[in-house]
Amino acid sequence: MITKDSSKYRSSITVAILLVLVFVLGLVTGRNVDKGDLTVLDFRNPAKDVDMSKFWDVWKLVSADYVDTEKVNKDNMVYGAIKGMVNSFDDPATVFLDPEETKEFDSASEGKYFEGIGAELGYESGQVIVVTPLEGSPAKEAGLRPGDYILKIDSYELKSTDSVYDAVGKIRGKAGTEVVLNVLHKGDSVPVDIKIVRREITVPSMTLEFIGENKDVAWFKVSRFTDTTFSSWISLWNTKVKEISASKTKKVILDLRGNPGGFFDAAIYAGDDLLDEGYVISQQRDGNGRTQKYESTKGGNLTGAKLVVLVNSGSASASEILAGALQQAKRAVVIGENTYGKGTAQKIYNLSDGSSLHLTILRWLLPDGSNIDRESSIHPDIEVVLTNDDFKEGRDPQLDRALKELSK
């Protein structure tokens, strides 16, 4: 069992994505469980069954014979070798960051804001995709959409070997400058160029609006499960929940569309406010198969409201945990499109040269014990697709269907 003031609310998780420049929600790792101390590891005693001779043979050959000798940089070679080793797991959430990338990640985690386009990127079938453009961002205003494949950045054509970091490095830039992305919208066959002017971006983690004919429906949009701190996110959540309670409304639309996740603990906290006592919100499983359950406790503040949850392909990680918990408890009707599929948490190991390893160490499960991944994401109870024409015309059939459901 857990309590709302429990010290256990310190682990966290997000989608395997990089937030392109508002702040990093977790790069391709998520805000992480904690930071590791490498002093307990002895790297001078590698496994005796590992033959490193081939590595050194190749090292010597490229060092001696590569045609462009100015490109033979030993530091880059070491970092490249480590990245190759880490990438062999085919886990986009497990990454090695060089010192420059680590510095950027740390600055972002401290709540320092960046200039850019305001979109989160991920992987699908080895290609860089847009997980979601942020509300109010230049990316969304320019027409970038969830599920877009990014084919080119300005004149550079992305290759299968390019990482999310490579893409972000080319998209990044100062406010007021321009970047052109060549993208293929989901469902289209012809790519288009989208011109985006970078700017400073501030996006609230949640907003509340009362809608419907009688303004008696609370449209509670949670854009992410992070803020500058975990406590600030909780404080804002509590404020919005009090507003809903004070309105006396019994109809709530919890809008998790485009929510890439954030603190795992925030999803647990939110679930505890929405579920009666004794429901499993999520489970945690480590590499040894040990499982821990997180259950709802007595005293949820929104248990009496009729609830609809909106999701789409930009809903990931912590938002999938919450949506899945409410769906399996039959507490809410889930409307929209299949979610992204990311249910892992990472631990950060800081290395002596300023680089870092973000390593997947935990898997978060739905109440019934099933995984959340690309093959088994959250499927809505009522599927409503937001088409390209809907996007262009400013229509929102998913929100309309939620209002219809609440009117029954």
Image (cartoon, helix red, strand yellow):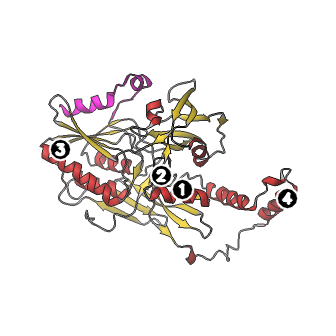
Q: Earlier in the sequence, mark 2 or mark 1?
A: 2
Where on the picture, by quarter, is residue 99? Answer: bottom right
Query: Is residue 303 highlighted in magenta?
Result: no
Q: Earlier in the sequence, mark 1 or mark 3?
A: 1
The residue under label 1 is 104
* Range of residues picked out in magenta: 381-408
Q: Between tags 2 and 3, which lies in front?
A: 2
Give the left or right position of residue 244, taking residue 135 as reference.
left
Q: Earlier in the sequence, mark 2 or mark 3?
A: 2
Where on the picture, by quarter, is residue 280? Answer: bottom left
Q: Looking at the image, which residue sits at the far front?
A: 176
Residue that appears at 56% across and 73% down? 38
Q: Earlier in the sequence, mark 3 or mark 4?
A: 4
Badge 1 crowding class, 10 Å Cα cut-off, few under 14, some 14 to 19, many 20 or more, is: some
> Where does the image place residue 384, in percent across and percent down from the top left?
35, 30
Query: Is residue 382 highlighted in magenta?
Result: yes
Count the numbered circles shown. Answer: 4
Residue that appears at 66% across and 45% down? 161
Query: Which label is found at residue 305?
Result: 3
Mark 4–mark 1 Cα distance, whole angstroms, equals 34 Å
Whether the residues at callouts 2 and 1 have beta carbons within 8 Å, the answer is: yes
177 and 257: which one is in front? 177
Q: Secondary structure at mark 2?
A: loop
Q: Between tags 4 and 2, which lies in front?
A: 2
The residue under label 2 is 24
Q: Between tags 4 and 1, which lies in front?
A: 1
The residue under label 4 is 61
Badge 3 crowding class, 10 Å Cα cut-off, few under 14, some 14 to 19, many 20 or more, is: some
Q: Earlier in the sequence, mark 4 or mark 2?
A: 2
